[in-house]
Amino acid sequence: MAIPRSLHSRPRWLAAAALVVAAAGCKAPDQRIAPFADAWGAAEFGRAEEEIDKLVAEEAGVEPALVSSSRGLDETIVPARGDTFLFLLEKAMTRLASNDTDATIDLMRRCRDALETRYTDSDIKGWLLAGVKDDTALEYRGADYEHVLTPALLALVDLLEGGQDAYAYALQVSEVQERILGSTFGEDVDGEGNGYNPRKLYQRVALGAYVEGLVREREGYSSEAFKAYERARDWGGAVPVVVDACERTTNGVYAAPHHGVVHVIRLAGRGPRLVQGRSPMTDSAMFLANIGSIVIGENVGTLGQMEIPVPVVFCPDMYAAELEIRAGGQVLGTTSTLLDVGAVAAQQVEANLPWILARAAIRRTVKAVAAKAAQDAADHSNSDPGVGLLLGALTNLALTIGEKADTRNWTALPARFQIARLEVPEGTHDLDLGSGMHASVRVAAGKDSYVVVVQPDLSKAGVVLIDVYSGAPDPAPAPEPAPAAATPEAPRP
Amino acid sequence: MKKNHVLLVPLALAAVVAACGSTGRVKAEGEDQLVGDKRAGTLTYDELVQQSTTKLVAQAGMQARAQGPYKVAFFGIETKGSEELRDQLPAIYDQIELILVNSGPFTVLSRKAVDRASQEVGLRDFSDLFIAKNRDAFIGVMGRDSNAPDVLVYGTNTTQTSESSGGWFSRDTKERRYTLSLEMIDAHTGTILAKVSDSSEIEYKK
């Protein structure tokens, strides 16, 4: 079959179509992270780290050996390059599982700074126009709950290191949260008050306020601690550990004489993972698409839209049971869920869905316009109308086929943050944390001790981490056996 | 002509690469330092440390004595503000120790020894230093190695923030005051010998 001349003269359309079709063949983000997420979810921390090192290396353009040897901290690994920071957040969790709190904090701080630069609460026009292919072509901005949980985890990990900066990180949680909730992004798209602000539907996260209260309480500032705990109660509901904290800082005391406090913080289960689903176009999304199309100056026809690929939250451990902590056969306490990460992620994705759909509708229309332009151009230079039609159809197909939902997210987060506060006499205690996990904690009178349990697979033992002050010293090494009388070397086979 | 074009392409490419790649430069002495656009940086902390430590030495008014310089156990800086000090801390500690040694009749005890002794005695918070038995225990541990301190020094870093949303013609503004307070107490009596602070304010716009 002879190729029409017009196709020779406009090879860029074919090249573009080929590129987009090739891009459509690329892995979806959730498939790309799956080897890591599966290993992490199975509590195979070593394998998970190998997998994430490969992804960090790929995204940052460095050798995998450099990622592992530098613990992800080499200066040439730039978190802001592509989605590197997202993979470094996963890497930070594997470092935490290796009890390398130092690298965990450094990695998370770098990621926090990269996340900050990606945060946008203005320029709705640019946001609407971005991402010709689909949302995965955009730089990942980080889910809003990831912005909040990064400093929250920094605060918790810092407590393990002695808590020098824990209070600062806890305050940062509130700062980030208020910035997000105070955002007017999407609220007034056309300058006439039309729009939709998904962030107004968000639930506040109580974790930062709780850590803030905890730090203030251990310093002896009960009234300040109460204010922070009160905020945690207002935001997180009547969680037993928070209700007790409010009561204690109002009418009680930090601990009985000669007693200390052990805080057990359990990162329980596999956190939310985004997978691709499909959604029909909704009325609210159509409304937003129409307003948006006016703002960006496109004449958008939003009728007859097909189903659109959208991110859906998958959280297999949504109902992680609480942990009972025992010592000497006695139950010392039970954890309370302070934050259900899966629920927060699901709520935020749901809240953002109208804009995700509206963007897709606008994008599809822009693509249809491009296809029409291709068709017109071909018609103009070719007498055969079939060529124009073919080019238009090919362009549209190439631009629409393989559209993917943006399923990027931080997969190593737990399903739930569960916290228990145990008041125990000073001395060393062997805490039974279930599933064969134990923590030998040295408790000082009037002081806090912190135990963090990282347990992504609830059917298996996870990793138990104890703060630097409270880890019981290792038992003295057994005396060297007396040198035995020289024995003749056994003959080799 | 065509040959010239062939030569120009790699030259242009090299120029683009040179313009986009990472670069480094040794700064001249006295050249201005960067002010962080989101958090306080070296400039702010250098100034705070310099000013407050110098004030501390002056206010303490210690004179040289026959037994030799006063032995200082420096416990560190507590973060009570909303910005972590993490990678600033080692440099801040070094600067404070340097100023103490160079501007007064002081000698600073090894930080590793102080940390180790604090851990052994179970000192976690600076407020523990105001309990006589804690101080005695600490001095006892340090004294075993003939390093019994005469004075104890510690500090606190705080921040105060004011925020204002921008309007049509102005950007969102955040003003943050950074304060470094230092305290020097008598290792034996727990009396406060000197207490000073210094502040610096940064305006952030976004």
Image: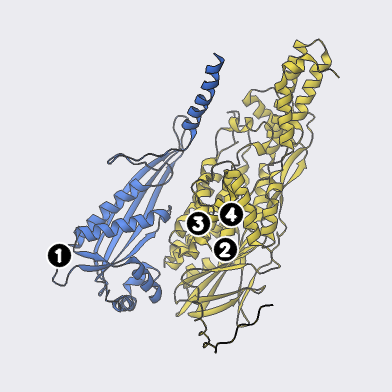
Chain colours: A yellow, B blue
Quick check: do tags 4 and 1 share a chain?
no
Quick check: do tags 1 and 3 share a chain?
no
Residue ranking furthest to the right: A1
What residue appears at the point 66 percent right and 27 percent down from the top-left corner? A293
Image coords of residue A214 (percent x, y): 49, 64
Q: Earlier in the sequence, mark 3 or mark 4?
A: 4
Q: Nearer the viewer, mark 3 or mark 4?
A: 4
Q: Quadrant of residue B35?
A: top left
* Classed neighbour count for the residue bearing mark 4: other residues with Cα under 10 Å, few (<14), some (14–19), many (≥20): many
Spatial CA distance of label 2 from label 4 is 11 Å
Spatial CA distance of label 3 from label 4 is 11 Å
Element at badge 4? helix
In this figure, which residue is indicated by the disc labeled 1? B63
Spatial CA distance of label 2 from label 3 is 13 Å
Element at badge 3? helix
Q: Earlier in the sequence, mark 2 or mark 4?
A: 4
As displayed, is residue B86 above or below residue B204?
Answer: below
Image coords of residue A28 (percent x, y): 71, 43
In this figure, which residue is indicated by the disc labeled 4? A91
Q: Amino acid at mark 2?
A: Ser
Say the numbered circle drawn on residue A105: 3
In this figure, which residue is indicated by the disc labeled 2? A98
Q: Nearer the viewer, mark 4 or mark 1?
A: 4
Element at badge 2? loop
| Left or right side of A61 for A168 | left
Q: Is residue A355 visible?
A: no
Q: Amino acid at mark 3?
A: Ile
Q: Amino acid at mark 4?
A: Lys
